[in-house]
Amino acid sequence: MVRSKFKGPVINIATPTIKSTVNKNNLNRLNRNLKILPKYINQTVTVHNGKSFEEILVTKEMVGHNFGEFVFTRAKFIFKKKNQKK
C-alpha cells in the first residue's frame, strides 16, 4: 500500500525502544510496514514473514525503507531433477 508523502512515514509510537538483544527472549517483533529509523542502526530485530519470525540486522543503508522489504514472504522456487528411466 502506497502512502502519500504529505502524511509522513508510518511510525508506531507504541513500539518499545530497542535494547541490547543479548537475551533471545527480548527480541523485538516489529511490524512489516514500519519505517526503519536511525535509532534502529546496528540492532537485531525480528520481523514476521507470515509463517515465522526472521532476524535481520539493520544497517545504515536500510534507513528509510520498510522492515518488510528485507524479509521474504514466499519460498524460493527450484526445479527438481527428474529420475531418468532405464
Image (cartoon, helix red, strand yellow):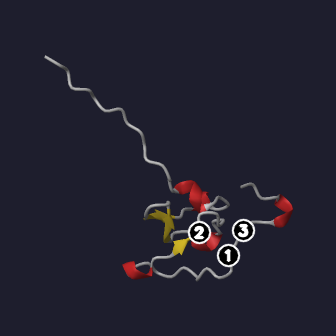
What is the three-letter code of the residue carrying label 2? Answer: Asn
Q: How many marks?
A: 3
| Mark pair 1, 2: CA separation | 9 Å
Mark on residue 32? none
Which quarter of the figure is the C terminus placed in?
Answer: top left
Categorize mark 3 by other alpha carbons within 10 Å: few (<14), some (14-19), many (20+). Answer: few
- Secondary structure beneath label 2: loop
Task: Report which residue position mark 2 lands on.
Answer: 31
What is the three-letter code of the residue carrying label 3? Answer: Val
Residue 52 location, x and y as percent? 43, 64
- Give the residue displayed 58% in from the left and 83% down from the top: 16
Task: Report which residue position mark 1 lands on.
Answer: 12
- Is there a contact, CB below 8 Å, between mark 1 and mark 2? yes
| Residue closest to the far right | 6
Among the 4 quarters of the image, the one containing residue 62:
bottom right
| Residue closest to the far left | 86
Mark before the other along the chain sequence, 3 or 2: 3
Mark on residue 10? 3
